[in-house]
Image (tube, helix red, strand yellow):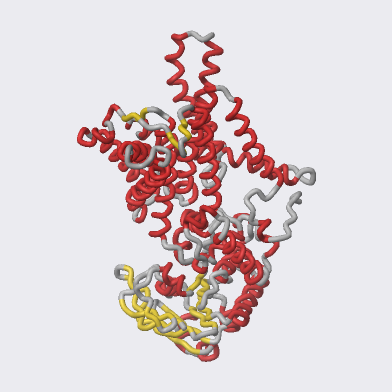
Amino acid sequence: MLRIEDLHLSFGGIKALQGISFEARPGEITGVIGPNGAGKTSLFNAISGFYKPDRGRVFFDGQDITGLSPDRRAELGIARTFQNIALFRGMTVLDNIKLGGHTRLKTNVWQALRYFGAAQREELELRRDIEERVINFLEIDHIRKYPITMLPYGLQKRVELGRALAMQPKVLMLDEPVAGMNREETADMARFILDVQEQFGTTILLVEHDMHMVMDICSHIVVLNFGQQIASGTPAEVSGNQDVIEAYLGAAA
Amino acid sequence: MINGNLKASYAADERVLNNTYKQTFVYGMMLALALFAGFANDYMILIACKMGILLIAVVGVNILTGYTGLVSLGHGAFVAIGAYSVTMLENGLTGIVPESLTIFVVLPLAVAITAVVGVFVGLPSLRVKGLYLAVATLAANFIVIFLIEQDAFAPWTGGVVGINTHDANILGWVLDTNREMFVLIAVVAFVSLLAAQNLIRTRVGRAFIAIRDRDYSAEILGISLLRYKLTSFALSAAYCGLAGAMFAYFYSRILPEQFELDLSLELVAALIVGGMGRTMGPVFGVMIIVMMPEVIKVFAAYFTGGDAASARYIAPLQEIAFGLLLVFFLLKEPLGINHITDRILRAANRWPFARG
């Protein structure tokens, strides 16, 4: 579904990514792990189009998307969330999630200015879809009219997931979905991610520090260290890999 | 506990006037305006027309600055382009298009021309933000006024001494009094406001707000910054062009100096005072900005007993009061008057179960 081939990225002299290659298989959850500064978020930014790689290609559904802008990639069906919540703070939960539907709507400026007719039909259809498929699903119906700023951290994370789901994406990229969450919130989020995979068949790519969660829900794991891919495989293969253990615990004396 | 908020359909919940207070306010205002058009004296009509014209322009600035978050200090130029386009087109089409139909050709054309210029002025917004963009748009204002004043274009623009304008003629109804113009301006202003509200509750307007709040987040949702920033500039310029057109039909003569930086600043000031990024913000802002000089005049006349010599104190007094008002709003109510009415409305919705 999403295939990365020999991706290189550098900022000045710093080599952020050096030859990353892996595939996020359709309908599966792929995890990207690694210590701080390993290049996980750089990898995400290269996949969503914010960074232009020096070398290497990104394929989506067999199509080379390396040269496309972030908004074109979104139109193709790639959604993502950010590590440090990137919701629109001036809006309500509902409006934030509605924005996820942007690429699916067709209202043009003229129709928007008139509202009645095509724009209204589309808006009401979007509202119904969001209510049924996102708001009920994520159990956030009680806060739909709240401004983002009034919500606790954990709920904001969930709303951001909702906004991504409203895109009806083929690939969902989650950048540290449970960072800073307590045990209960983490368990909730893990359950939602599994539900997304199960109910919508979405291909999921996630970056996470919480090892328990990654090992539990991912079917395939890619390990980065200092911009290099040091291992990839099933959770069992990766956790037994000597390089991975060294990267996380330090080399044995 | 919010009263009167039971909704049985999504359509009901998506309505703009979604509670009785808002409905009462808006329908009440419409009734008041209708009565006003019939019974207000000539002076009040004059003031109201000024407000209406300014309102249309401020609604435009609100789309760009309030919703899309792009600051412009050049919108006076768009009002100028609207006003001059209408006048020059009216001149050019005399004898070609029947007089009773000219407005239907001229008005859309003038608005379209302004929108196109708006796209060009908006080009720097793709690279720069904030203060830098403000300066870039400021330059556009100076360039437009400079071009209008050029002797080479004087046969068409009238140059520095200005140009006589035409009266609006709608299917033979010649709007040659202020009261008739008030009816037109009020209708156009109301429709403008409604259209702006429609815009921001649908896809296009939401994209604008997304760009304002967090541009990279907008991009990953599939919103093209290029397309939407330029659309915002075009729309906002179009509104100002429409205001300029009303300006030309209202006054008997237009001069380049009426559209200089002063006007651009007044538009932004009205928006700040009223409330950026809110539909009713421009309405409140324009009321204050236009009414304040009048109030000062009345007070000055009261204290001086109508002494003619005191008139020379009034003009600087107005400037000072204008400055103080802006400072007051920036400090005490940065979200504008709209925020005050929001609080009142919320309290009303919750009464008697909770206060505030």
Q: Residue at x 48, y 31 (%)?
A: B50
Residue at the extreme right: B352
**In the image: residue B114, left or right of residue A142:** left
Task: Determine which quarter of the picture holds residue A44.
Answer: bottom left
Q: Residue at x 74, y 42 (%)?
A: B355
Q: Residue at x 63, y 60 (%)?
A: A152
For the residue pair B53 and B139, the one nearer the viewer reads as: B53
- Count the marks: 0
Quarter placement of the C terminus of chain B:
top right
Task: Determine which quarter of the picture holds residue B309.
Answer: top left
**In the image: residue B340, left or right of residue A51:** right
Q: Is residue B241 visible?
A: no
What percent of the width, then of the height, locates residue B326? 49, 33
What percent of the width, then of the height, locates residue B244? 41, 38
Q: Is residue A101 above or below residue B266?
A: below
Q: Is residue A223 visible?
A: yes
What percent of the width, then of the height, locates residue A187? 65, 75
For the residue pair A23 and B61, the one nearer the viewer reads as: B61
For the residue pair A56 and A236, the one nearer the viewer reads as: A56
Q: Is residue A70 above or below residue B147?
A: below
Residue at the extreme left: B152
What percent of the width, then of the height, locates residue B347? 71, 43
Q: Is residue B197 above or below residue B296?
A: below
